[in-house]
Image (spheres, grey):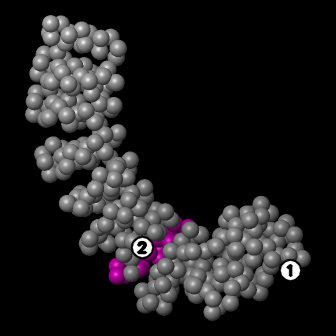
Amino acid sequence: MLDLRKIGAYISKLRKDQDLTQLELADQLNVSHQAVSKWERGDSLPDIGTLPQFARLFGKTVDDILNAGDNAENREHLHLGTIVEEIAENRPDQVAEMVNTGEMKVEELVEVAPFVKASALHKVTERLDSSVLKLDVIMRLAPFLGTDTLDELVRQAEEGEIVWNVITGLAPFVSSDTLSRLVDKSIDGSLEVHNLVGIAPFLEREHVDRLVQQAEEGSLSWHFVQGLAPFISRETLSRLVDRVADGTIDANRIISLAPFLDSESLEKLISGVEAEHLSPYLLASLAPFVDQGTLSRMVTNLLNKVK
């Protein structure tokens, strides 16, 4: 991984060796002195168009800059500068060809991705072979690619097994349709609650509701519904309450959803207890979520029935 602080220190050394102020360097590169200050603090790097210009100014290569002056034999990645220069010269096909043939590692493209515009990175990735652009690589490139590009790359790469760490990594960046497709493809016996909960904020309500329906039908464990509770639509929650009230769903299943039920649903359950369709033990579980007046009335009624 690129060490921005180390690169920043190297940039600072090069500038001082030339006896330049940050402002003088900024003027020569046509950037602000604040930008130079950020480079030297390790907060950012020169953009991909400025890096070659910076390197030439100090008689260095882009690889020298990105490796903070380390000797070639100590460098983990040998082609970072080449990638930068080819993209800066609008030659994405050259970068893709070198990755496809194995001349450079795809990990090197991942390394420079944070400093490449999404449009330029797209031009490279669309030319990469599917044998190179695996889902785990797409996941690492995801923060730097546009949604449409990601959706297309995932579609091309998802023929094999989908693992949950990849789905979780892609969740914030792909479209809801693509995410839903990955989830549907991956629901099997290995699915765990935390997997689904981790990506739930990025799923459409309709898909969450569909997962709840699968749990109702028995093809998905009810434990998943408990984890999805904050993301279930009000309509689906209301339907679940109706099914508890008419006896088609075990009342114990609704207890974990109680914090997310509206007053109308809670009242419906309370009425079921009062009418003795539902167990009075349900009242104890619902008590923290029921208004004081209703709770007092219910307790009084139950005590009167006991007498």
- Viewer-proximal residue, 295 or 230? 295
- Give the spatial CA distance, label 1 vs label 2: 39 Å
Q: From the viewer's perspective, is residue 217 above or below residue 260? A: below
Question: Residue 278, which numbered label?
Answer: none
Would you say the residues marked 1 and 2 are in contact, meaning their CB atoms lie under 8 Å apart?
A: no
Q: Which residues are magenta?
A: 117-131
Question: x and y percent of residue 106 in the render?
Answer: 47, 81
Q: Which residue is mark 2?
A: 137
Residue 92 seen in the current view: no
Question: x and y percent of residue 81 in the render?
Answer: 62, 83
Question: x and y percent of residue 145 in the render?
Answer: 47, 65
Residue lying at 72% horizontally and 81% vertically, measured from the top left: 55
- Residue 43: which quarter of the image? bottom right
- SS class of the residue under badge 2? helix
Residue lying at 37% horizontally and 52% vertically, measured from the top left: 198
| Outermost residue, front side | 307
Q: Which residue is mark 1?
A: 17
Q: Quadrant of the C terminus?
A: top left
